[in-house]
């Protein structure tokens, strides 16, 4: 009988690392092939001429590949890896386990939301280079393939109807206007035509008229008819069948689905009941702080009256979209030189401030961040909502900019891209609890940077923290405790001074993406807890700049992984002669 000889530990480790990184590389490439739009966002132009295959067969094949990837990583010996590689292993394993666990909920049967879908495909153009004729020809091929995407989307919606997997009607009522925006008489007015209105020097003059003619022909003969077909199906068949309820628990296997989403987004094992109770506690704490600001500015009246004053007094609003954009850019420039007070490491990638496209602005949030390309070919951008300046108060600009731009999402994403030797999935990872928890924590770093000298800006910081605390209450309220949409709106308005426009959009966002909004406050509370722990254990040896750098040093990871990293960092600092 032959007896296998044990391999030396060093060889075992090398084999395990080789297998691990082969898996990472192959799965990264698969992800780009299967999701060409994500590849475009990453700055990878190889698939700029196509969309994702949204057919049922392609979805089934992708899910099978996810299950195979999970089996592959489980077959690799974790104990044969270094601590750094174990973090890579654990992060990939967590993602694959959640991906496979979520397959049973068939979320692809709701392919359209009020915040995006096949009706807003033109938005991809925001991240495309359009520097050469080939860039335009790639976009023309994508435009030509829009009818296939529309047909596949309708198939998925029909399957959703059969399965009873339908979105809330109150959200779907926003979609007909979005579809209608794609149905134009003049092709030059199509959102898909925007890139053809202005050419860069890299596009020869001789090519331009032909490119424009091809674009107009495709819009007229392919895109507009496809959206007319979508409009007919959506308005006449799908929308009337959308459900009247709002709770995720009303979907097939809904309670398990919401439990899954809460765990997925928060990367914790907290129950809906625990999260709801935590939200109530945080709301009470923050209200007490708001009362102090009200007293400081000398406002005579109730907190509700103070909120109304903040929502309506003309002093807090810019008069035009352009003035609002200029103001946002001024705030960003005010933050930039103060960053050295809270960080030793400043990421190399730059960022800019842009308006949210007009066709998206009425139905989306106050602002969002778009990461830069992973190859450095495109900067990160802070997108701000200029729709209705009269509902965009200036007191929210500082915390909002700290969250979405620097040192919030831009720092988090840009630092991740600079992780040495990390696989691409780690450098581009987005765990909501970590990433959005960091964004909310970054709002509070304005105090470390001396940016909250105005009491109304401090009220803005509290308003934004309250906003995230309210989320814990209303998200669990609507999806696990039977709250109505109106009840959630009223609770939000009673506890935060955000304007009605924002409050309604926010509540509808929580209805449309159950559980996602829970992650912000959960993540921020964990990061703040770790900071307090480090300060208590290191005493005079604690440096907030070093702590902030260490939080970003892992890239986006589950909160348990972040906690292990910070605890190891604290122990290391103590070993260097810090306090016991």
Image: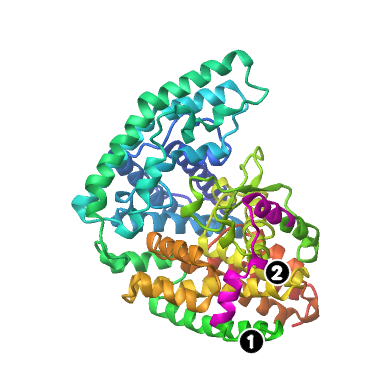
* Quarter of the figure with the C terminus: bottom right
Q: What element carries label 2?
A: helix
Residue 328 covered by magenta stretch: yes
Q: Nearer the viewer, residue 359 or 535?
A: 359
Instruction: Identify the residue under disc 2.
Output: 445
Q: Nearer the viewer, residue 293 or 412?
A: 293
Q: Are marks 1 and 2 in contact (CB under 8 Å)?
A: no
> Residue 337 placed where, x, y %?
81, 58
For marks 1 and 2, give the CA distance: 30 Å
Give the magenta range.
304-330
Residue at the left extreme? 162
Query: In this image, 234 relative to 543: left or right?
Result: left
> Residue 571 placed where, x, y %?
69, 74
Seen in the picture, residue 178 relative to 268 is either above or below; the reply is: above
Residue 158 visible at all: no
Query: In this image, 41 relative to 224: left or right?
Result: right
Seen in the picture, residue 424 relative to 534 is either above or below; the reply is: above
Instruction: Identify the residue under disc 1.
Output: 300
Query: In this image, 338 relative to 81: left or right?
Result: right
What residue is drawn where x is 49% and y is 63%?
501
Q: Earlier in the sequence, mark 1 or mark 2?
A: 1
Q: In which quarter of the image is residue 216?
A: top left
Seen in the picture, residue 120 relative to 174 is either above or below; the reply is: above
Which numbered disc covers residue 206? none
What type of secondary structure mainly makes up the magenta span? helix
């Amino acid at each position: 009988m032959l007896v296998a000889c044990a391999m030396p530990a060093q060889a075992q480790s090398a084999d395990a690392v080789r297998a691990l990184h082969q898996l990472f590389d192959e799965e990264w490439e698969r992800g780009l092939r299967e999701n060409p739009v994500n590849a475009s966002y990453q700055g990878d132009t190889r698939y700029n001429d196509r969309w994702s295959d949204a057919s049922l067969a392609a979805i089934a094949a992708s899910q099978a590949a996810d299950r195979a990837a999970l089996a592959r990583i489980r077959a690799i010996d974790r104990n044969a890896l270094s601590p750094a590689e174990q973090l890579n292993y654990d992060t990939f394993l967590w993602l694959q386990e959640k991906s496979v666990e979520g397959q049973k909920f068939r979320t692809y049967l709701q392919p359209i939301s009020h915040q995006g879908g096949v009706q807003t495909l033109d938005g991809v153009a925001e991240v495309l280079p359009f520097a050469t004729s080939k860039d335009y020809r790639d976009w023309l091929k994508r435009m030509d393939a829009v009818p296939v995407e529309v047909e596949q989307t309708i198939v998925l919606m029909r399957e959703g109807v059969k399965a009873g997997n339908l979105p809330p009607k109150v959200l779907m009522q926003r979609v007909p206007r979005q579809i209608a925006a794609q149905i134009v008489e003049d092709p030059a007015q199509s959102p898909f035509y925007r890139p053809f209105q202005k050419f860069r020097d890299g596009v020869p003059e001789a090519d331009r008229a032909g490119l424009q003619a091809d674009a107009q022909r495709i819009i007229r003969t392919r895109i507009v008819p496809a959206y007319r077909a979508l409009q007919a199906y959506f308005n006449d068949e799908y929308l009337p069948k959308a459900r009247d309820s709002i709770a995720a628990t009303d979907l097939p296997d809904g309670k398990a689905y919401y439990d899954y989403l809460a765990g997925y987004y928060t990367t914790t094992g907290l129950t809906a009941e625990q999260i709801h109770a935590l939200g109530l506690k945080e709301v009470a704490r923050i209200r007490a702080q708001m009362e102090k600001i009200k007293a400081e500015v000398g406002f005579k009246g109730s907190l509700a009256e103070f909120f109304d004053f903040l929502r309506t007094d003309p002093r807090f609003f810019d008069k035009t979209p352009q003035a609002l954009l200029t103001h946002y850019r001024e705030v960003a420039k005010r933050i930039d030189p103060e960053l050295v007070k809270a960080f030793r490491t400043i990421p190399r990638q730059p960022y800019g401030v842009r308006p949210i496209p007009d066709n998206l602005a009425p139905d989306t949030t106050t602002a969002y961040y778009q990461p830069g390309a992973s190859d450095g070919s495109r900067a990160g951008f802070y997108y701000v909502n200029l729709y209705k300046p009269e509902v965009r108060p200036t007191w929210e600009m500082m915390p909002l900019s700290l969250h979405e731009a620097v040192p919030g999402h831009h720092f988090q994403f840009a630092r991740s891209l600079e992780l040495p030797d990390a696989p691409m999935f780690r450098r581009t990872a987005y765990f909501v609890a970590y990433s959005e928890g960091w964004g909310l924590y970054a709002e509070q770093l304005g105090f470390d940077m001396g940016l909250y000298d105005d009491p109304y800006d401090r009220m803005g910081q509290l308003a934004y923290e309250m906003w995230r605390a309210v989320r814990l209450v209303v998200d669990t309220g609507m999806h696990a405790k039977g709250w109505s949409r109106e009840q959630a709106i009223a609770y939000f308005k009673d506890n935060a001074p955000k304007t009605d426009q924002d409050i309604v959009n926010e509540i509808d966002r929580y209805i449309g993406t159950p559980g996602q909004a829970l992650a912000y406050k959960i993540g921020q509370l964990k990061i703040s807890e770790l900071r307090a722990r480090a300060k208590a254990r290191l005493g005079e040896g604690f440096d907030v700049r070093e702590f902030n750098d260490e939080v970003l040093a892992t890239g986006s990871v589950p909160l348990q992984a972040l906690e292990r990293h910070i605890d190891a960092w604290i122990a290391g600092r103590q070993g260097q002669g810090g306090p016991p």
